[in-house]
Image (tube, grey):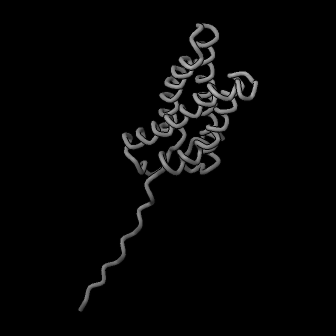
Amino acid sequence: MVQGLRSPSSGLLGQGTRFGLAGGLVALVYLGTTTLLADVVGLPFQVALAIGFGVAISLHFTLQRVFVWIHHEDFALPVYEQAGRYLAVAAVQYGVTAASTALLPSALGISTELVYLATVAVILSVNFLVFRHGIFHAKPADESPAPIVEAD
């Protein structure tokens, strides 16, 4: 079963499973790094968040390329274009996370960590489609060229 899920032939189920596994690992690294730096080391939460985010996106990009979005075909985009798009998405994610953890806890009367966890959950749920269709997608299958018809 595990071999089947790792295969490019596993389709949407395999992609979803691999995405979930990679995301779970990255979420643990992100949450663990941020929480450790904020609560144990004593860094301000926003500083810990930036460091945790940097560690997490490095791991995440690597896992997306080598584990999650495996194809029989090559990627449609070269790695530098994938990285550019990925970093644009990451910048938006970071901005949303930083803004939500800075503004919502006092507005809602709840802890920063709770807002952080909710924000991460929402962002992760959107990434699957963005990554699948806009960043780590395969080249389209080669179409057979139209036959050449010679005029008499």
In the image: residue 135, left or right of residue 7? left
Q: Position of residue 37 (x, y in %)?
A: 58, 13
Question: Does residue 14 appear in the picture of this structure?
Answer: yes
Residue at (69, 32) in percent of width and height: 118
Q: Nearer the viewer, residue 31 or 103?
A: 103
| Image vertical order of residue 43 relative to residue 122, above or below | above
Q: Position of residue 129 (x, y in %)?
A: 58, 48
Question: Does residue 4 appear in the picture of this structure?
Answer: no
In the image: residue 101, left or right of residue 109? left
Residue at (52, 22) in percent of width and height: 50
Q: Position of residue 78 (x, y in %)?
A: 37, 45
Q: Nearer the viewer, residue 53 or 104?
A: 104
Name of the residue lying farthest toward the bottom: 152
Name of the residue lying farthest toward the left: 152
Residue at (50, 35) in percent of width and height: 90
Name of the residue lying farthest toward the top: 41
Q: Quadrant of residue 32?
A: top right
Q: Quadrant of residue 43?
A: top right
Q: How many marks?
A: 0
Q: Position of residue 147 (x, y in %)?
A: 34, 78
Please identify the quadrant where the N terminus is shown. top right
Name of the residue lying farthest toward the right: 109
Residue at (44, 51) in percent of width and height: 73
| Image vertical order of residue 43 relative to residue 11, above or below | above
Please identify the quadrant where the C terminus is shown. bottom left
Q: Nearer the viewer, residue 123 or 139?
A: 123
In the image: residue 152, left or right of residue 139? left
